[in-house]
Amino acid sequence: MVSPEFSHPQSSSPMAKTRNRSFWCLPDGCLVLGSAFLSLLLVWSFWSFFTPTQNFQSPVTEPSLKSKSSEDCSESGFGVNLKSDPKDRTFYDDPEMSYSIEKPVKDWDEKRQEWLKYHPSFAAGARERIVLVTGSQPKPCKNPIGDHLLLRFFKNKVDYCRIHGYDIFYNNLLLHPKMGSFWAKLPVVKAAMLAHPEAEWIWWVDSDALFTDMEFKLPLERYKNHNLVVHGWPKLIYDSKSWTSLNAGVFLIRNCQWSMDLIKTWSSMGPISKDHEKWGEIQRSTFKDKLFPDSDDQSALIYLLYTEKEKYYDHIYLEGEFYLEGYWVEIIGGYENTTERYLEIERGAPKLRRRHAEKVSEQYAVFREEFLKEAGNGRGSWRRPLITHFTGCQPCSGDYNQMYAGESCWEGMVKALNFADNQVLRKYGFMHPDLHDSSTVTEVPFDYPADEGPW
Ligand SMILES: *[C@@H]1O[C@H](CO)[C@@H](O)[C@H](O)[C@H]1NC(C)=O
Ligand SMILES: [Mn+2]
């Protein structure tokens, strides 16, 4: 067991995670109930997203309306030129270039730079640009409400990306036949890096994770000297040697050669390797709390950090300060209090209650920040958690860790989805009055008196 100051989402519970073997399950979410009974465990795996970001440079500097022809509007999307692809040769013209996880990419930094040189409108905002990537199974869900839940998880990610100007790619195909389950994300991330040379970051978010603070933006400045950002705790890696010392269900990876190399090394512990079974044994003997035999992506990443600290530690940012992803069991009971605290703030701050276009939401997020100084972050905080992760509940297969009552997974998801959706709907004039009831709706009043909330 881990002491609470690490605020480790899974470590406080008596279970370990397990990943399920279902074809498409993405790993991070599996929980195992280690018990003397049979353990059953199930885990989820879902995919997550990536979000792309776009740049904020606008070629239009002139406020004059009449000079803006409709052509100006059609030329670009958010200040980037979507129509121009010069004839100059780039890595895309190299017949040796492969998107496959089995063929490493070399000199990627130079190749990406060269592409940006030929596409200057993308170069402008490249440093901050994020593409969110996520995905799910190729087939219909076994859980009767699985596809509905996945749709809502995806809608949530689309909402977050739209609000922040990020691109999003949803994959629902196994890109390498052997890389199923929790390994499926790596081929997708690699392909997304090549497909998006305009993006500095690929942000993988599992399908069973959702944004529950639609305003919060990643503190990219903090990561400027790092290439991979995951939710994790160094003490749990190096002292406790726990396989839940970080969570691989959500990560931000820089679109660079270092990351290409990492993906190659990382995936070499997966099912594409002839040593896959051996890696499972090594992981299990290294991380005693890992209860299932297969080599998994999360243990593999921890293993690299643990065994090759000099090589990896300085490049990987273990974000433990806020909920880059947070364990749903410790989060969802706090949504009501959080809602109340935010309302209280708004009652005293007319500028936060002011109606506005969704496109300018980030300005209001900045306004709100001054009132959140006391909110804290992560466990015990009343700040909205950035991402709530339903580890241990698999929406698509319907499997869940037996330590939860089955209903609590789906009920928890509905509550989280509605909590997030209310932050979005508000800009459209409506809201869910009851977080447990997805189908009821009320109109948000133009403004509300100081002693009332919007409902
Ligand atoms: C919500 O706030 C009340 C009143 O401050 C407190 O007693 C309760 O423990 C809080 N609930 C949670 C889940 O934090
Ligand atoms: Mn997950």
Image (tube, rainbow, N blue to C red):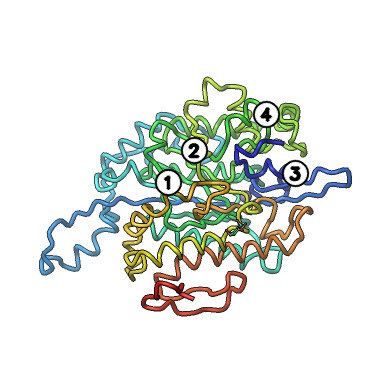
Q: What residue appears at the point 77 percent right and 60 percent down from the top-left corner?
A: 405
Disc 2 or disc 1, which is closer to the eye? 1
Mark 4 residue element: loop
Mark 3 residue element: strand
- Please tell me whether residue 451 is drawn above or below residue 229 in the rendered image: below
Q: Residues within 10 Å of mark 4 (few under 14, many from 20)?
A: some
For mark 1, what is the residue? 218
Marks 3 and 4, how far apart at CA: 15 Å
Q: Could you tell me the amino acid type at mark 2?
A: Val
Marks 2 and 4, how far apart at CA: 19 Å
Check whether the beta carbons of the residues at disc 1 and disc 3 lie within 8 A of each other: no
Marks 1 and 4, how far apart at CA: 28 Å
Q: Could you tell me the amino acid type at mark 3?
A: Met
Q: Could you tell me the amino acid type at mark 1?
A: Leu
Residue 308 image position (x, y, % from top left)? 58, 22
Is 315 placed left or right of 305 in the picture? Answer: left
For mark 3, what is the residue? 15
For mark 2, what is the residue? 229
Is 317 placed left or right of 29 in the picture? Answer: left
